[in-house]
Amino acid sequence: MTFEPMTLGKFQEQAEPARRCVTRATFEPMPVGRSQEQAEPARQCVPGRSPGTRARRSAAARIVISLLPLLLFGRIAFAADWPQFRGPGSRGVSSETGLPTEFSEKTVAWKVPLPGPGPASPIVVDGTVIVTAAGGPRQERLHVLGIDAANGRTRWQRTLWATGPTVCNGFGGVAASTPASSGRLVFALFSSNDIACFDIDGNLQWYRALGYESPRTRNDVGMAASPLIAGDTIVVQLENPGVSFATGLDTSTGETRWRVDLESGGCWTTPALWQGKSAAEDLVVLQSRVGLTAHEPQSGKQVWRLEQPCSSISSTTACGEYLFAPINGLTALRYSLQSKGFEPIWQEQRLGPANICPVVHEGRVYVTKSAGIVVCGDAATGKVLWQLRLKGPFWGTPAIGDGHLYAANHDGLVQIVRLGKDSGELVSTGQIDSGVLASPAISGGAVYFRTNTHLWKIGHKASE
Amino acid sequence: MRTSISTVILIAGLASTAAQAADSDVATRLADLRAVGPEAAGHREAAAAWQGIAAESPAALPAILAGMDGAGPLAANWIATAAQAVVERRLQKGGSFPSAELERFVLERNHSSRARRLAYEFVLRVDPKAEQRLVPQMLDDPSLELRRDAVDRIIGEAAAAAESGKSEPAVALYRQALQAARDLDQVQLLAQRLRKLGQSVDLARQLGYLVRWKLIGPFDNTERKGFDAVYPPEREIRADAAYPGKQVEVRWVEFAAEDDFGKIDFFKPFGQHREVAGYAVTEFIADRRREVEFRMSSFNATKLWLNGKLVDQYPVYHSGSQPDQYVNRVLLEPGRNVILVKVCQNEQTQDWAQRWDFQLRVCDEIGGAVLSADRDVK
């Protein structure tokens, strides 16, 4: 199969507009084009986001737009939220600057114990770090915590009892899915298929026991797909050896909008949101073991399908009009107005992400192999540009911010890599607790790491 | 003077009315929370009720927690999180806290186990020393979580005795803890400690695993079709029967598990196979008609029957397994009950997929062993 190479430069991202500036006394949302409570920086993933028009936008305009936040605010830390698995747009990239590039005693702002283990990554919303954990001998106590990002104090904690199975691989855990937030609401999903919606102050809005409702929906290795917010629908993909389905729930009530049956089989991938010209054109991309499908968020109606074996662990990344899917290594697909679907552009085995998700940033795609090799490729062509060996093993997808890649291996070795044009350079390392399965989160000038026992904030201390 | 008395009576009356109204509000809101059901049923009303409950004064906590009595698991979570919000707000803002009332609630075993556990956790947040008062009373508690803490306490005392060379008291304490323990990790730890002190422990018996079975197989499970195929043991149980198997004629053979967790391993009598099905049958003598839990686990696809009636089926291969993986509540008849298990092994070739076994234990609702009347006779 040969694919038409993309025009170079199409993946040039605009720096995401910061939602809030931490230096302001009151937080005012920055205009992002669409009035919606969810930050949607991925819409600016490629300037001129409309397929077909994007390429025509001039390079100069792109540069100006990308520099706008910097021109307006100078080099200060913006408190952009990290609202879901892999952050804004699920791309693993933050627009923030002024991030710590050194790990030392000085840069550990705080470290707090968690009430249980879990591979779930933290998210950060409006100065609150949301993290989940599962405690008790059978991990049947499901904790959702709202932690003050400034000082590490618990603002609120809610604990439910699991209503579905909590049988899981001892390596993982019941708190495996990363929560998602629309800004006002927080959605916490667990391996028992319990999903609870709280407001940002911890007030319960609704609660669905999807495992209780569908007892044969279970994976005794554990479930791990994270929820995805698509407008006012929260999408949950429950693909497992039993009764498999994806469902779209009304974010405000938890009522079922749609349900799509899926083929049975173990799969732990998180859906991706491909953002169209307007919200009405957005698509939810489900990645199963047997292929990719695209669905309308409101109805669940399937509008496109690609039958190709996909990774059952690493998830697709949507960026601009493209998808980067873990198929045959890594496959880039581009949305076609003509076919109303995605067409393969390139495929590269060496960019195969194994258990970790691809991260796309400024025309580059970064994959981190489980054993520890970071591979940087040209997002337009799939050409491998450089590699850097880190110390693995890795389970969590690294995060990128301010020109650096932040990664922590399973043993708790934090590794900070400066990303260059032709190479990457390991600039700092530091040790946190072992048992890191989660991805880091970046917000408010800090990087958060979650281990099986603690939540760490690496950044400037409150007094500084 | 008369005016003052009238005023006092009036104020008392108003206060009483206000308290009754507040009680009524709590009751109404709890009713809304208890009405939630699957598929988001009752969510809109429950969300408003949750806010009302969460804004209640801590004095309402015993009544709120009592709302969990008899509630389904969904409603219990709604109520529990609202109660947590009440406590959290009290801790942030200060004010009175009904410690004594909650402590009483913890000790009243007629309340929901989860509600009592929450009450216990709330009490400890304002009075950590309450643990010393309450935990010693919980060794036989119907709440698994409260009992666990009591067992932990005895384990600590036993370990201290063992460390100071007092092995006899240590053994007695470990035995006491083992008798009370229901969580598998605690039971395992206790068995390990007792064995280290030279004591014998029949762990399979302690946990209620069924260890003596008759097995037959292998039948054909090519392309996983054997799972739905009805082989003769599903129609009749005859100890002396012989049937055509996958390759040769098959007969029932006796098998006794020898490990701590009653592992019934078909590879042992029949050799290593792929794409096969086998059956295990045993009898359980119940002293009376009673509800029990069948707690089964297997890496293989399984079906389970009791007295000829299909209890459940799990057409899943090598997804993962832990003790108590599948829990079914069943009704045992007085006297002889026949338990039949079908275990299917598939075509997978990976090392970790080479298993053809299961475990099954019979318990009460918190995991206490329920033994067949003839267990020690066999």
Image (tube, rainbow, N blue to C red):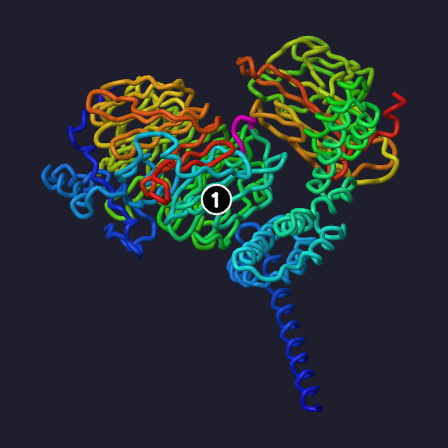
The outermost residue toward the right is B377
* Closer-to-camera residue (B114/A228): B114
Q: Quadrant of residue B345?
A: top right
Q: Position of residue A309 (x, y in %)?
A: 39, 24
Q: Quadrant of the N terminus of chain B?
A: bottom right
- Position of B6 with respect to A179 (left or right) is right
Count every numbered label the image shows and give the total: 1
Give, as a single range, the part of the protein colored magenta.
A169-173
Seen at 36% across and 24% down, the residue is A429
Magenta segment main secondary structure = loop
Q: Is A447 in front, or is A302?
A: A447
Taking B84 as reference, is A268 above or below it?
above
Badge 1: chain ID: A
| Residue A171 located within the stretch drawn in magenta | yes
Quadrant of image for the C terminus of chain B: top right
Query: In the picture shown, does residue A343 fall above or below B4?
Result: above
Kindly tell me whether residue A255 is visible in this rendering.
Answer: no
Residue B197 occupies quadrant: top right
Query: x, y percentage for residue B47?
Result: 52, 58
User: What residue is pinned by disc 1?
Assistant: A188
Name which residue lies at 70% across and 26% down.
B189
Mark 1, secondary structure of its residue: strand
Magenta stretch encompasses residue B157: no
Q: Specify whether residue B74 is in view.
A: yes
Q: Position of residue A177 (x, y in %)?
A: 47, 37
Q: Is residue A234 left or right of residue A35?
A: right
Along the viewing direction, whichever of A79 and A166 lies nearer the viewer:
A79
In the image, what residue type sits under mark 1? Answer: Ala
Is A6 on the left or on the right of B353, as rendered? Answer: left
Instruction: Identify which residue is drawn at 53% across, 34% down.
Output: A117
